[in-house]
Amino acid sequence: MKPLELLWGEAFFAGSLAQLLARLSGLPAVVLLLATGLLVGRAGFGWVQPESLGRGLEPLVGLLVSLVLFDGGLNLRLAGRDLQRTVVQLVLVRGVLGLLGGAWFAHQLAGLSWPLAWVFGAIALATGPTVVTPMVKQMRLLPGLGKVLEAEGLILEPAGAVLALLLLQLALGDLGGWQDVAVLLLLRLGGGVLVGAVGGLLLVEVLRRLPADADALKLQLSLGVLFVVVSGVQVFLPEAGLPAAVSAGVVVGLRLDEQASQLDELIAQLAQLAITVLFPLLAADLSWSELSPLGWGGVACVFALMLFRWLVIQAGGIGLPALAWREKLILSWIAPRGIVTAAVASLFALQLDQAGIPGAGALKGLVFLTILLTVGIQGFTAPVLARRLGLVADDSETALDSGPVLAKAVEQQPGGQ
């Protein structure tokens, strides 16, 4: 068996090489990270074998993902009622319609049983900030639209992970029915948010008492509090660590104000490092044998989901004058799935295999196929579409004059970027 030190070294090198190629070529970094992981993993040369890490991979991935979510929470400042209403309405509508649509397509087109189709529908809700945030920054999307996409991922990613776990327990027979799912969903989301907020408040009070030049100590304390809060709440409320990380980041970002931007520069560098190693590592765990049994039904399921999002955005945008048609179009096209989606699918497939429930490989394969197609297709096409619609930062003056109301409203807010 390959030494673990070499495995981590290869994963870090593969990720950093993908970032370098993205910088030199201008291609989407998330696409190259994913392709690199496939190339060096089980689907390619087999140099990186994540299964060698055993159960140690799961908690490490959880902590690194919580770092990315914490970084996103620090930046989640939704200035203006139009932006806040847009995010809340879109998230609520997509949470309901996305779950129903994802489950129906997975059952009808990909052939998953209904219990596993519901699990897939919940997993597919997550449009991860680990993918969305780098994509938004690289394509220079206008601030208002970028905030909507990032907020959607930060809210639905932890919510989808918690819901997927509960639906998995329902499929395994550990829960009595949908009523238990609803009660536990509220308990775990609410508990995670509450614990994260308390941890964030305590961290703020400590950071305020430190000297202005103690940046290194502030970073160490932030990571220490974040990781103990996330790991602690996970013990009592499984999967609640993700909403706790977002909640802690939001509280610290709002309470520290200017100091938060200084802290975020440090956290953002570590979050980018986490993305650089995690994406190739999880992609390396995918083999073509897990994708091939799905056939064209799996591909049709993913494309149906991508097109269905347009209907969801249209429904979610009803009564929102801040969203022009061009903004709805770009929002409906950008929905890549990321690290949490991959990690949750890998973990669930293992639990289903251990329980002897058929279809675990098909569930994991369909989730990874969703990641591959959404990241690959949208990563290449979204920047072109945004430029054609005049929704990139370089064309902001033209775009504001010609109708993107949401971007205009954000620019006029004191907290707008």
Image: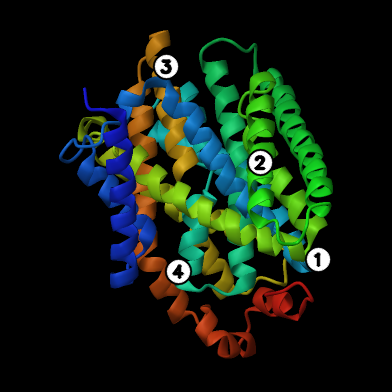
Q: Residue at x 77, y 33 (%)?
A: 195
Is 176 located above or below residue 159 in the figure? Answer: above
Q: Earlier in the sequence, mark 4 or mark 2?
A: 4
Q: Is residue 53 left or right of residue 200?
A: left
Q: Mark 3 and mark 4 in contact (Cβ < 8 Å)?
A: no
Q: Which residue is mark 1?
A: 81
Q: Amino acid at mark 3?
A: Leu
Q: Quadrant of residue 37?
A: top left
Q: Residue at x 42, y 35 (%)?
A: 106
Q: Secondary structure at mark 3?
A: helix
Using the rendered image of the protein, determine whether residue 181 is visible from the camera's viewpoint: yes
Q: Amino acid at mark 2?
A: Ala
Q: Secondary structure at mark 4?
A: helix
Q: Which residue is mark 4?
A: 138
Residue 197 screen position, x and y as percent: 79, 41
Q: Which mark is residue 245?
A: 2
Q: Mark 2 and mark 4 in contact (Cβ < 8 Å)?
A: no
Q: Which residue is mark 3?
A: 352
Is 417 located above or below residue 147 in the figure? Answer: below
Q: Earlier in the sequence, mark 2 or mark 3?
A: 2
